[in-house]
Image (cartoon, rainbow, N blue to C red):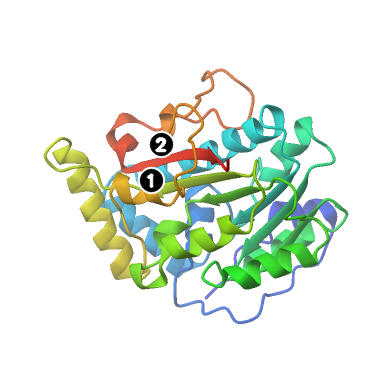
Amino acid sequence: MARPDPPEFLKRTGQKYTEPPDIDLTKPSIARVYSYFLGGKDHFAADRDMANYAEGVVPGVTDLALGNRAFVQRAARYLATEAGIEQYLDIGSGLPTDGNVHEVVHESTPHGRVVYVDKDPMVLTHARALLADNNTTVVLKADLTSPKTVLQEAVGTGLIDLDRPVALMLGGILHHLQDDDDPGGTTRELCDALAPGSHLVISHFCCPDAARSPKSAKRAAALQKAFMEKLGHGLWRGREEILSYFQGWPLVEPGLVPLNDWRPLPKESAQAGNYVMPPRNKHIIIGGIAKKP
């Protein structure tokens, strides 16, 4: 199976591409599938097959990846410019693209510290190359389902101080945990370790109430079937279950809403985060931010 061209950031920096270890090229990776959805180059045939299959099942599924990326960018900007957060723990960060969290944060807070966490070995290799000259941002290879390890390693970087407010960013990752992985308990363990004034960012695939939104519910069910068949994970949960992941913390306005509705930017804005999903898939992914009292 042919390897795609080295990513653009390696070309720019002149760094040599080294094949990451432990990659099964026959199985899709959600990090690489998202890279394909977002227009990146870091994917293999199995990843493209998965993405194209999902797009065939529900046309416009690429909207979810683009909309999620835009929401995370707007959330990062809010946290840096309005909430005054200086520390960020971004779990399930995925492969580097334009408008990464540290880039958005550093627009207004150059000293802001960002720790990315992902379990995909390719993410680790590429992100470390991208951040080679950055002393405020690091990437760790760790698994969300081991929250104690994630916290220990994040603190071990010297960039995260749990006695001060942290932004915990779980953008588009909890829906890739099975129920047996206990996404609620995992999130609670992470949140319990955070200081008051910390913020929690979550975006999650949502299955709307079938009685109120039958078309959206049908789309959600079809996509969940496609994700489970090809990836083995990807759950569209109900709004109340997703809301429970915020630990009862007060939600920042406008609350837990379709991503398009969370502090949208004008379409003509040049800032990262101005993407607007078409209405057909608007209601099957939602997100919000909460602040720890």
| Amino acid type at image mark 1 | Leu
Of 17 and 153, nearer the camera is 153
Residue bearing mark 2: 256
Of 25 and 202, nearer the camera is 202
Q: Callout 2: helix, strand or loop?
A: loop
- Residue 65's x, y, as percent? 46, 46
Judge from the rendering whether residue 64 lies leftward or rightward of residue 87; answer left or right.
left
User: Does residue 230 sit above or below 252 in this rendering?
Assistant: below
| Amino acid type at image mark 2 | Leu
Judge from the rendering whether residue 227 lies leftward or rightward of residue 37; answer left or right.
left
Residue beneath the point at 80% across and 56% down? 159
Residue beneath the point at 76% across and 41% down? 86
How busy is the neighbourhood of tag 2: few (under 14 within 10 Å), some, or many (20 plus)?
many
Mark 2 and mark 1: Cα distance apart in space = 7 Å
Query: Are the residues at dot 2 and dot 1 in contact (C-beta closer than 8 Å)?
Result: yes
Residue bearing mark 1: 243
Whether residue 41 can be seen here? yes
Q: Callout 1: helix, strand or loop?
A: helix
How busy is the neighbourhood of tag 1: few (under 14 within 10 Å), some, or many (20 plus)?
some
- Residue 146's x, y, as percent? 56, 73
Residue found at the very far left of the displayed protein: 211
Of 258 and 32, nearer the camera is 258
Whether residue 94 can be seen here? no
Q: Earlier in the sequence, mark 2 or mark 1?
A: 1
Residue beneath the point at 58% across and 40% down? 293
Residue beneath the point at 50% across and 31% down? 275
Q: Which mark is residue 220?
A: none
